[in-house]
Amino acid sequence: MGVAEDTVVVFAGDNGFFLGELGLFDKRFAYEPSIRIPLVARYPRGVEADQVIDKLVLNIDLCPTVLDYAGVGSLDGMHGESWRPLVEGRPVPNWRRWSLYEYFREHGYVHWPTSQALRTEQWKYIRYPEGGNEDELYDLESDPGELNNLSKEN
C-alpha cells in the first residue's frame, strides 16, 4: 500500500516477568526484571534505527507519544509525556528523573507483599509498608543485578 514509511509501529509489553532471576518467579516485585518494560518502535520517517533511549520512560508515556505522532497532542488530564523529542534527539531539560512503583497485595496472593519503590537512573529504594520485609536500597550503576542491599550498611 506504500504507507510503511509513514506508519508508526510500536511493540510493547505491560511488564517483565521473573524466570528465576534473584530466585523469583511471577511479576509482583519491584526489581528490574519485573518493572522494566520491553518497547520497540519503528517509524522510518521519524525514528533513527537502532537507538537505545536511556531515560526513564514509563508505560503511561505511550499514549501521549502516539497522539503526538498523530498530530493531536495530549488530552487534558492525561498522565505521561511524549517521548518523541527523546527519539528525535531534541533536548528535554525537565524530563522525569524518578518513577514510582506500587504493588498492592491481592487477595489470595499471600507470597507477594504490598511494596513501593522509588527509582531514579542510578538508585532504587524499596519499602514494604505492611512490614515483614526490610527496606532495600540499590545503586543500579554499580549493582545492576540488585544483589547488594545498601540499606543494611551503616
Image: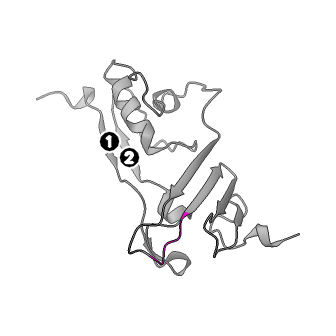
The residue at 72%/63% (across/down) is: 137
Residue 36 showing in the rendered view: yes
User: Which residues, given as a range, are shown in magenta?
Assistant: 110-114
Residue 41: x and y in percent read 36, 41
Q: Which residue is mark 2?
A: 40
Q: Quadrant of the C terminus?
A: bottom right
Kind of residue sitting beneath label 1: Val
Above/below status of 140 relative to 78: below
Residue 45 showing in the rendered view: no
Q: Which residue is mark 1?
A: 10
Q: Secondary structure at mark 2?
A: strand
* Magenta residues, dominant SS class: loop
Above/below status of 138 relative to 49: below
Residue 69: x and y in percent read 35, 25
Residue 121: x and y in percent read 65, 48
Q: How is the image coloured?
A: one colour
Q: Residue furthest right?
A: 154
Q: Residue furthest left?
A: 1
